[in-house]
């Protein structure tokens, strides 16, 4: 009976709605073709270029073997420290739902996903550099000049600065999903600290850890700006930096292809291993709501845990807040340099235009893939839907330089300089921001419930009217947030722009890197402040534009009728 009613309702739809219903699979298939085509095309170009190379060079050539060992070691060490230390931090935050500054600390942790890398590096240099805020304390404790920021220790410190807050925030989000009934029962049974960890907290964290560790390892393994700035010499070179040098300075395309394929194989193998174990973490964080367990008495929240939680939270604040504060204070002191900086405002305009293009591209691809996947899922094509939705997530295993190198080799005969190189940067940034945009939009895309759909059909609300009045109000804020994430990721990109950009026409990250390399501290401070203000402005402006409720025509008629009655 239900199938017959569904069939009759589909037959009775007007031709315009029937036409619109064919758009989702077409848009999804086009987006999947674009993503898979460019990804496989770049991979094919790499394989073609590296066809005469032997992988044994990676361990037979001493320099390449040293680069590979250092890359694996720093990524492994950074992942162990970032993810391992994030566990007690997340447990402490979940155990302390109320303390002064908790909201500020959570907001600062959420910045780790969108904060441009060079801004964080600027703050780390201001705090931990040889003349930084922590230099006198280090000299007093160690009796030597502060030099730990450069080399392996500096790289690991920067990776922990970025990835520990992100890991802890995602773990906290997982801990907050525990039902209130579980915490109420644990309170009534008087479970000890060990029992709470074994029965409530660890089951929430265990499914998250494999893919979270794979995500952090991939970010550290493919790190570029951090190694370029804090490496301290050839001894701290990584595969990403060696790939950049081979392509940019040595023009050794075969070596660049071999290094890019090595990165791809390692990252893909790790992700395949992680996909076979554990659940998928969300790549973006939700609201900082009060945890469900915070309303019930926890026996592990008293006693020695007060001291240990205070230590962990103080250590997190000491790691995260001083560099951010240093960026703001240094930027304020560099404000007099703004009128005299002739290249700052063109670089800012160039960065905004490229970020808008990359954000719009990532958002369009994300919506097309998710809409097409949902259309297939509602028609019982589960495997096709999974393939279409997973196509956008596979970009995570392809580093930006790998994708950029493959596209460069693919388009090399016709690729010119100037705007064509920047167009390639926008294309690569759009693809790299696609997984983050999909994570934001996915939660809001399921749309109307079955009763709402039946009611809309009874009132004849179909086609564009349904899209305008029922679906768009639910999607506009997630779409704006996804656009903000994609734009800020593109604003802070340095690896791809360093490869294909022009030093004479830099973006803000490239200009900041040039100023830091030339020891122009005041100009770098002003550039970092402008870049940070642009990141904040993108989020604030898009949030403000979508915060106001939509204006429906019947509200205007009701207001006019109300005024007529009063008069």
Image: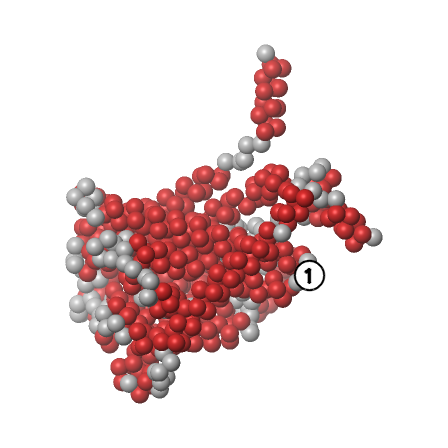
The image quadrant of residue 117 is bottom left
Q: How many marks?
A: 1
* Residue 249 x/y as whole percent: 23, 70
Chosen colour scheme:
secondary structure
Query: Please, which residue is most extreme toward the front here?
Result: 414
Residue that extends furthest to the top in the rendered view of this protein: 567
- Where in the figure is residue 232, as x and y percent of width and height? 22, 70
Q: Quadrant of the C terminus?
A: top right
Relative side of 304 to 244, left or right: right
Is label 1 in a helix, a strand or a loop? loop
Q: Residue furthest right?
A: 1
Q: Is residue 457 visible?
A: yes
Residue lying at 25% horizontally and 54% vertically, measured from the top left = 506
Query: Which residue is more in the foreground, 388 or 548?
Result: 388
Residue 547 in the image: above or below residue 305: above
Q: Is residue 386 left or right of residue 502?
A: right
Question: Foreground residue, 335 or 22?
Answer: 22
Q: State the image quarter where residue 141 is shown.
A: bottom left
**Residue 405 percent location from the top left of the image:** 35, 68
Q: With 337 as the anchor, is 529 left or right in this view? A: right
Residue drawn at x 35%, y 69% is 409
Residue 430 in percent (x, y) is at 42, 56
The residue under label 1 is 380
Mark 1 closeness class: few <14, some 14–19, many ≥20 residues within 10 Å: few
Answer yes or no: is residue 165 visible.
no
- Residue at the (25%, 57%) spot, across then down: 502
Residue drawn at (55%, 74%) of the image: 276
């Amino acid at each position: 009976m239900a199938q017959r009613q569904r069939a009759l309702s589909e037959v009775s739809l007007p031709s315009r709605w029937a036409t619109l219903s064919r758009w989702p699979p077409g848009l999804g298939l086009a987006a999947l073709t674009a993503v898979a085509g460019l990804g496989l095309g770049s991979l094919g170009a790499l394989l073609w270029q590296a066809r005469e190379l032997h992988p044994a060079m990676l361990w037979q050539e001493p320099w390449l073997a040293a680069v590979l060992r250092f890359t694996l070691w720093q990524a492994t060490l950074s992942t162990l420290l970032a993810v391992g230390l994030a566990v007690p931090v997340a447990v402490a935050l979940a155990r302390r739902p109320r303390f002064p500054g908790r909201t500020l600390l959570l907001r600062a942790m959420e910045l780790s996903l969108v904060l441009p890398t060079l801004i964080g590096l600027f703050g780390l240099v201001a705090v931990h550099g040889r003349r930084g805020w922590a230099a006198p304390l280090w000299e007093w404790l160690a009796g030597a000049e502060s030099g730990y920021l450069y080399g392996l220790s500096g790289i690991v410190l920067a990776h922990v600065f970025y990835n520990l807050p992100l890991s802890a925030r995602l773990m906290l989000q997982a801990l907050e999903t525990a039902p209130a009934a579980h915490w109420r029962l644990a309170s009534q049974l008087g479970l000890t600290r060990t029992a709470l960890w074994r029965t409530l907290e660890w089951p929430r964290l265990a499914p998250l850890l494999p893919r979270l560790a794979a995500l952090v390892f991939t970010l550290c393994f493919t790190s570029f700006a951090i190694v370029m700035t804090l490496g301290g010499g050839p001894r701290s070179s990584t595969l990403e930096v060696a790939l950049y040098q081979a392509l940019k300075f040595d023009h050794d395309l075969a070596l660049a292809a071999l290094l890019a394929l090595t990165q791809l194989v390692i990252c893909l193998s790790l992700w395949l291993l992680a996909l076979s174990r554990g659940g998928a973490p969300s790549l973006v964080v939700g609201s900082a709501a009060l945890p469900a367990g915070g309303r019930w008495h926890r026996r592990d929240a008293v006693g020695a845990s007060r001291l240990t939680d205070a230590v962990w939270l103080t250590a997190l604040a000491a790691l995260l807040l001083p560099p951010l504060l240093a960026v703001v204070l240094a930027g304020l002191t560099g404000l007099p340099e703004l009128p005299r900086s002739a290249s700052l405002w063109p670089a800012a305009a160039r960065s905004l235009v490229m970020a808008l293009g990359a954000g719009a591209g990532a958002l369009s691809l994300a919506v097309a893939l998710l809409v097409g996947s949902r259309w297939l899922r509602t028609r019982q094509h589960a495997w096709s839907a999974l393939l279409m939705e997973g196509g956008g997530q596979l970009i995570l295993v392809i580093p930006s330089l790998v994708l950029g190198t493959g596209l460069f080799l693919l388009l090399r005969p016709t690729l010119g300089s100037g705007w064509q190189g920047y167009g390639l940067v926008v294309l690569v940034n759009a693809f790299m921001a696609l997984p983050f945009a999909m994570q934001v939009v996915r939660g809001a895309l399921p749309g109307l419930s079955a009763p709402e759909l039946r009611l809309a059909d009874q009132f004849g609300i179909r086609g564009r009217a349904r899209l305008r009045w029922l679906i768009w109000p639910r999607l506009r804020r997630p779409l704006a947030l996804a656009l903000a994430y994609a734009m800020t990721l593109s604003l802070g990109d340095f690896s791809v722009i360093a490869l294909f950009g022009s030093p004479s026409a830099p973006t803000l990250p490239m200009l900041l890197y040039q100023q830091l390399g030339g020891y122009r501290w005041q100009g770098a401070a002003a550039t970092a402040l402008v870049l940070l203000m642009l990141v904040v402005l993108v989020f604030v402006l898009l949030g403000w534009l979508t915060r106001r409720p939509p204006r429906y025509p019947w509200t205007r008629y009701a207001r006019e009728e109300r005024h007529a009655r009063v008069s």
